[in-house]
């Protein structure tokens, strides 16, 4: 069976510090990978998605970047965090192609202070 | 651009009631629609996926319907239990595009 792991679960970082959130998927090959952010009381905002190694699409311009160094690894990064980067970050995966269920990790709480 | 809304934003019902959650989408040319459950501080758990060619899907006490022509989907929960308390989100996917999520309905089932 497929599983998705995301870490760290909780993170408190000062403004201006770097960020690295990591996500790995097991039990499948060549998945589509996604990073979402969920701000308090708001819906999910798609930040990045990837259909293959090194292929990253950005949905919104912002202070964050994503990388996919391996088939089942997806990393969300920032060089300098802003207060507005605080939120709940969710990694997700789906099989390639359209019409497939999307599966989420447990999420990472980021508080920028 | 696809937009997804959900009403009500919050719902509180006594245990045992049957209830309906609503999801609306603006672009009826969807490929599929998915319902999720989110517990506080946790990730999303997929409940039901309805393909565009389907009218409904059922899993246990849950039944999701899809009416593309009216841009609506409903999630029916039968005989609600306190353990059903969570936020329920729907998401629509158009062909070649990623899922667009609604803001969710926060459900509280009172014992």
Image (spheres, rainbow, N blue to C red):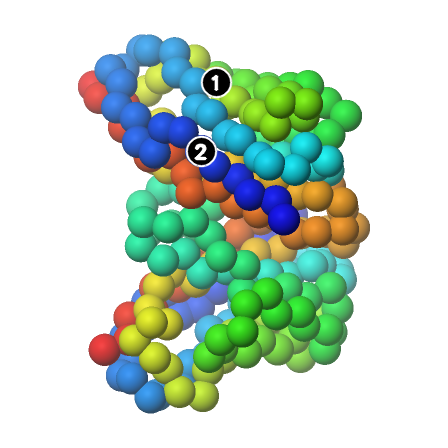
Rendered residue at 52%/45% (across/down): B101
Tell me which chain the residue with mark 2 is part of: B
For the residues bearing labels 2 and 1, Cβ distance under 8 angstroms: no
Percent position of residue A107, x then y: 42, 58
**Residue B66 showing in the rendered view:** no
Label 2 element class = strand
Percent position of residue B61, x then y: 48, 17
Disc 1 residue crowd, few under 14, some 14–19, many 20+, Cα 10 Å: some
Name the residue tied to disc 2: B6
- What number is the disc on residue A104? none
Nearer-N-terminus badge (2/1): 2
Viewer-closest of B22 and A9:
B22
Label 1 element class = strand
Percent position of residue A81, x then y: 37, 82
User: What distance separates the C-alpha of mark 2 from that of mark 1?
Assistant: 14 Å
Percent position of residue B14, x then y: 24, 15
Name the residue tied to disc 1: B76
Q: Is residue B91 above or below residue B13?
A: below
Tell me which chain the residue with mark 1 is part of: B
Viewer-closest of B96 and A28:
B96
**In the rendered view, does B91 fall on the left or right side of B43?**
right
**Residue A89, quarter of picture:** bottom left
Q: Is residue A92 above or below residue A75?
A: above
Disc 2 residue crowd, few under 14, some 14–19, many 20+, Cα 10 Å: many
> In front of the other: label 2 or label 1?
2
Whether labels 2 and 1 belong to a single chain: the reply is yes
**In the rendered view, does A28 fall on the left or right side of B9?**
right
Rendered residue at 53%/31% (across/down): B24
């Amino acid at each position: 069976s497929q599983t998705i792991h995301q870490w760290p679960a909780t993170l408190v970082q000062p403004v201006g510090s770097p960020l690295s959130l990591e996500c790995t998927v097991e039990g499948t090959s060549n998945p589509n990978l996604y990073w979402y952010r969920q701000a308090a009381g708001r819906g999910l905002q798609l930040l990045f998605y990837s259909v293959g190694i090194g292929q990253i699409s950005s949905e919104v311009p912002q202070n964050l970047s994503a990388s996919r160094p391996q088939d089942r690894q997806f990393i969300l990064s920032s060089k300098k965090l802003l207060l507005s980067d605080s939120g709940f970050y969710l990694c997700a995966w789906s099989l390639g192609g359209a019409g497939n269920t999307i599966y989420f990790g447990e999420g990472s709480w980021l508080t920028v202070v | 651009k696809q937009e997804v809304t959900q009403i009500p934003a919050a719902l509180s019902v006594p245990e045992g009631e049957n209830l309906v959650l609503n999801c609306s989408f603006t672009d009826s040319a969807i490929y599929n629609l998915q319902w999720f459950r989110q517990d506080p501080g946790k990730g999303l758990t997929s409940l039901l996926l309805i393909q565009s060619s389907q009218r409904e899907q059922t899993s246990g006490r849950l039944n999701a319907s899809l009416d593309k022509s009216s841009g609506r989907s409903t999630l029916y929960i039968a005989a609600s239990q306190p353990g059903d308390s969570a936020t329920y989100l729907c998401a629509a996917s158009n062909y070649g595009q990623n899922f667009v999520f609604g803001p969710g309905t926060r459900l509280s089932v009172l014992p």
